[in-house]
Amino acid sequence: MKLKRAKAYKKLLHQYELNFGFREPYQVLVDWQILQDAYNFKIDLIARLEKILGGQVKPMITTCDMRHLYAAKPKNETLILQAKEYERRRCNHQDLDEPLSTLECLSSVVDPKDSKTNKHRYVVASNDISVRAHMRSVAGVPLIYITKSVVLMEPMANASEEQREREEKSKFKQGLKGQRKPDAGPKRKRNDEEEGQSIAGGATGDARPSKQKREKGPKGPNPLSVRKSTKEKSAPEASASKKANDAQPSTADATNTHDAEASGARKRKRKHKPKGDDTSAAIEDDGEVTAP
Ligand SMILES: [Zn+2]
């Protein structure tokens, strides 16, 4: 499966999970025709289904479609054996003399009350065009089919998409109501409107929502300003300490001055040897320490 397609399927499944409550293991109603086509293309249908849906799959076949397999000419024994391992979805058509068409049977199984909802959250894997066309009118039915030996999932049908949007809107409204509940009603409503304005045209005014933003605000610039202040602080401190060192050498600097004294002493030895003269030595020391 191509990476791009796999990503699209993952996103699609996520939407089905969020908006229609799909969960693993995914119940996949397979019709006899897609089984036959998968057999002809030598496709391991269940493995492909698991890849597409990205999870465990529980394949199911209706009693009517099982009967279609038995009635097929030529009869495909391997396919029958394979389909027998799937969970049998009883459709209450078993007492009829002839099985219903896949369209009639699957329609009654997926949406028994014709309420355009996929109550039991079935995925439908069908290579019957009329079946898929009907299922597109039912909200929240992932549709899988085979074309040219490739197993594909249809993008979300309009009915599902509209249902999804409706639910998202209602959830959004519920969310807003939920926010309003703890606080007083009308005031909160005004704030919501202002929030909407600020989102649309940037933050303006001193309304309460902006006050919330202000509370959050200092967290952002703080690290920068702190860093800046430390730099400013540290620089004068360093220079101040340098001056202090010049004035009163610390113990660490004392060793340096001793070295300087030693080297200076050698130099001084050539020029003149004022061993007893402390003041002149101290002046020369200072000059030599500050020069480098
Ligand atoms: Zn049936």
Image: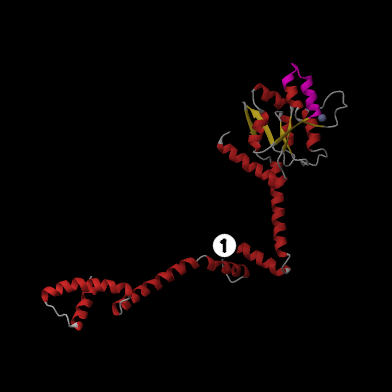
| Picture layout, residue 255 above or below residue 154 | below
Q: Which quadrant of the structure image shows residue 194?
A: bottom right
Q: Mark 1 falls on what kind of element?
A: helix
Q: Residue at coordinates 66% horizontally, 45% vertically from top-left?
A: 15
- Between 155 and 74, the residue placed more toward the observer is 74
| Residue 8 % position (x, y) | 60, 40
Where's the C terminus, which quadrant? bottom left
Q: Is residue 161 visible?
A: no
Q: Which residue is mark 1?
A: 201
- Reply yes or no: does residue 23 show up in magenta: no
Left or right of residue 157: residue 281: left
Q: Is residue 215 visible?
A: yes
Instruction: Point out the stretch of residues depicted in magenta.
Output: 62-78
Where's the N terminus, which quadrant? top right
| Residue 185 % position (x, y) | 73, 68
Q: Amino acid at mark 1?
A: Gly
- Between 10 and 256, the residue placed more toward the observer is 256
Query: Are there few (<14), some (14-19), or many (20+) residues within 10 Å of tag 1?
Result: few
| Residue 19 % position (x, y) | 70, 47
Q: Residue at coordinates 75% horizontally, 23% vertically from top-left?
A: 81
Residue farthest top in this picture: 74
